[in-house]
Amino acid sequence: MNDVAVVAGATGALGSAILRRLVGADLTVVAIARSVDQLDAVAGAEGRVVALPGDLTDDGITDRLRGLLDELGAPVRMVVQAAGLPGSGNVDTITGAEMAAGIDAKIGGFVRLIRGAQHRFTEGSRIVVLGGHYGYEPSPAAPLAGMANAALGNFVRTLADRWGPEGVTVHLVAPGPVDSPRMQGIAERAAARRNDGVTPDQVLDEYRSGSPLGRLTTVDEVAWAVGLLLAPEAAGLHGSTLSLDLGRRRGIG
Ligand SMILES: NC(=O)c1ccc[n+]([C@@H]2O[C@H](COP(=O)([O-])OP(=O)(O)OC[C@H]3O[C@@H](n4cnc5c(N)ncnc54)[C@H](OP(=O)(O)O)[C@@H]3O)[C@@H](O)[C@H]2O)c1
């Protein structure tokens, strides 16, 4: 049996590209998402993918993941939390319930994943979570993404203290806006909210112009960065953030 990786959000734009990278690195991938049909499509299209349909907001996912990993019986080389945040309002419309649900899915889900996989960690295992640019560059348009991603920066450091002594490293991968269906949807909602005649494509152009490269981060760039973390030398990145924002960030440090 090959070593195992666990990818949550495995049917998403980023999660499915990450899954393909990890399969290409000779890992068997446990793929987690809620939609059974989409998971089956991913598992059918790729060899060595084991579908685990489930909701990261459900505590039961931990025991189900633990049981499946015991059946597979191999070390876990990498856990990736790539599940999407639920939809939420802007700073004027977001509700407390939306904020709490988002944190539960993204950060609570990350905790549930780690708990389900940790008994199979070995020296050199990687714990990876996707955050994002808004955690460092807050925007009134995306308060939940900002807060969740900033909190992940802190939590990754906490996990680095916990797992470093066991030779397990922890990494936050933080893309800027990615050329993906999710970003297309965000641009459509932003255009509708503005109600000033702006089109979703013009909103996307504004996002593109926020980078000196004049474009969005690609799905492949994010998947490449996660795949890179399998290298033994990537232990040097323990506890840090891999920023894939194409030079958007203005602050130093
Ligand atoms: N796309 C971007 O521009 C961008 C930029 C920066 C950071 N990010 C980070 O990357 C994440 C993923 O982005 P993406 O573009 O790949 O999103 P996406 O295409 O919308 O995919 C989201 C994935 O998460 C799964 N998921 C959502 N809620 C879940 C839950 N409660 N339990 C289990 N699985 C769940 C979805 O499947 P089901 O719905 O079937 O469960 C799907 O597989 C974002 O949320 C964000 O944190 C994205």
Image: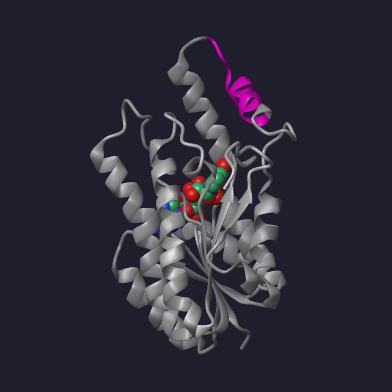
> Horizontally, is 186 left or right of 61 in the view?
right
Which residue is nearer to you in this view: 245 or 184?
245
Magenta-drawn stretch contains 202: yes
Image quarter hosting the N terminus: bottom right
Kindly give the residue lying farthest to the front in the view shown.
Answer: 252
Q: Quadrant of residue 126?
A: bottom right
Q: Is residue 71 visible?
A: yes
Colouring convention used in this rendered image of the protein: one colour
Q: Residue furthest left?
A: 96
Between 172 and 184, the one lying in front of the other is 172
Is residue 81 positioned above or below 93 on the image?
below
Q: Main SS type for the magenta part? A: helix
State the image coordinates of residue 210 (x, y, percent, origin top left).
64, 30
Residues drawn in magenta:
197-208
**In the image, residue 127 lies at what x, y percent?**
51, 70
Position of residue 103 measured from the top left corner of the image (x, y, whole percent): 34, 51
**Residue 117 inside the magenta-drawn segment:** no
**Residue that appears at 28% across and 47% down:** 100
Q: Residue furthest right?
A: 213
- In the image, is residue 67 above or below residue 25? below
The answer to whether residue 34 is seen in the rendering is no
Q: Is residue 66 above or below residue 58?
A: below
40 w.r.t. 13: above or below: below
Indicate the quadrant where residue 125 lies.
bottom right
Q: Residue shown at 53%/47% (left/top)?
A: 132
Q: Is residue 137 left or right of residue 228?
A: left
x and y percentages locating residue 130 in the rendered image: 52, 55
Q: Residue at x 56, y 37 (%)?
A: 183
**Residue drawn at x 36%, y 68% as measured from the top left:** 112
Quarter of the image holding residue 178? top right
All told, the count of numbered labels is 0
